[in-house]
Image (spheres, grey):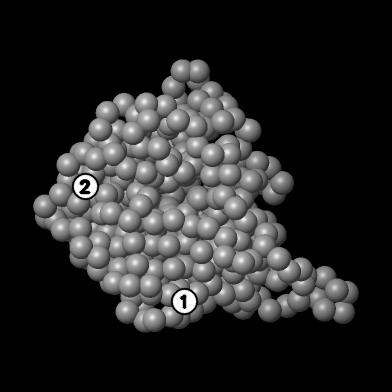
Amino acid sequence: MRRLWTSLVIAVVAAGVVTPGSASADTGPVRGAGYVWADNPTAASYTPAPAYQMNSVGITTRNTITRLATGRYSVRFTRLGVRGGVAHATAYGADTHQCKIEGWSPSGDDQNVVVRCHTLAGAPVDTRFTASFTSNKYWNGWEYGRTYPGAYLYHGDPTSPNSTPSSYYQYNSMGGVNTVSRVGVGAYSAFLPAIGHAVTGGHALVTAYGSAAERCKVVNFGWTSPSTTIKVNVRCFTAAGTRADSRFVLTFTDRTNTLGLDGCCNPNGHQSGYALANDPTAASYSPSASYQHEVPTGGATATRAGTGNYSLRFAHADLGTGSVHVVAAGWTAEFCKVAHWNPSSGINVRCFNAAGAPVDTPYDLDYTGPWLLG
């Protein structure tokens, strides 16, 4: 196992060389990515533990979290303050609280991502969560220097029959223009053109956007006509579980992580994994090979401990670090969240129906870890 970046303070100072993942002397905002695990929900302001946050500016760069009000938080990603990009959030814990993105924008040189969290009844609540941001325009993977299939978008016009997200708030690794169609109340199809010819399966992540308590999920995804287009179906619901029009953010990736970061173990490489856990009543299984991926090469195993109580393990991921996102899959109002992750028990996921009772349902999950030495 390669050593984590927290132990990699080995800069070659004499030659003026910066080691992979270390900060440069440049100032000003840059494109890049970051994540946090926000584990102190009532603190006025704090810096998350180094093992559970990352900023692509450098290994010594720290992100901060500020509590703005009950259930409302600002995540500040240092020096990532460019216009555009995409942000996601996932509630953390074994309860039924949910989190979403209220918005993001540059603040000086930094990127300010605002997260909202709610109870099952839709009331603001202080709770733990994970959050991520990326503005990367080059979707890196295992083979250094190669662009992998990927796309993201912010859909801000939830009642329009057809819309094209702002060029600042969408990306397509093949240069195509992503679009969204509304197919019914709270029902959307996102079209990601040109990337389909290189997609082998992939992974989709959706987060609701706004200040109210709506939540969104992935229904399914796959190829559509023309065959080079990937179609991701999305459903959004009120806190009570009825379909509702909502803004949302979406990321699709294939064979790399949802932040577009170099896959392990290239320079600046990151351990990464994703899986579609699509057999919700099986005691233990390996998700479909087309819809799981891990770098370094490995595999995922999903297990069920009880109704709506799941664990997922990747063969090589160091789960004493990193960040996790999870979203329920399917047509109806079930939702999922990450309960915890650690090396001994893997990534624990809890899923619920609209009434808050545990329920068996498929889910999509992704993990992104810190830098490893290439």
Q: Where in the figure is residue 254, as x and y percent of width and height? A: 52, 40
- Name which quarter of the figure residue 155 lies in: top left
Q: Amino acid at mark 1?
A: Pro
Question: Residue at 61% of width from left, 74% of height from top?
Answer: 61
Q: Where in the figure is residue 123, as x and y percent of width and height? A: 20, 63
For residue 316, say whether it is visible.
no
The single residue placed furthest to the top in the displayed view is: 225
Pointer 1: residues within 10 angstroms few (<14), some, or many (20+)? some
Residue on which disc 2 sits: 238
Nearer the N terminus, badge 2 or badge 1?
Answer: 1
Disc 2 versus disc 1: nearer the observer:
2
- Name which quarter of the figure residue 54 lies in: bottom right
- 226 relative to 362 in the view: left or right: right
Q: Where in the figure is residue 104, as x and y percent of width and height? A: 48, 57
Residue on which disc 1 sits: 48
Question: Residue at 70% of width from left, 71% of height from top?
Answer: 23
Q: Quadrant of the C terminus?
A: bottom right
Residue toward you, 98 or 312: 98
Residue at mark 2 to residue at mark 1: CA–CA distance = 31 Å
- 306 relative to 117 in the view: left or right: left
Q: Amino acid at mark 2?
A: Thr
| Kind of element beneath mark 1 | loop
Q: Which mark is residue 20?
A: none
- Name which quarter of the figure residue 131 lies in: bottom left
Question: Residue at 49% of width from left, 32% of height from top?
Answer: 164
Question: Residue at 24% of width from left, 58% of height from top?
Answer: 350
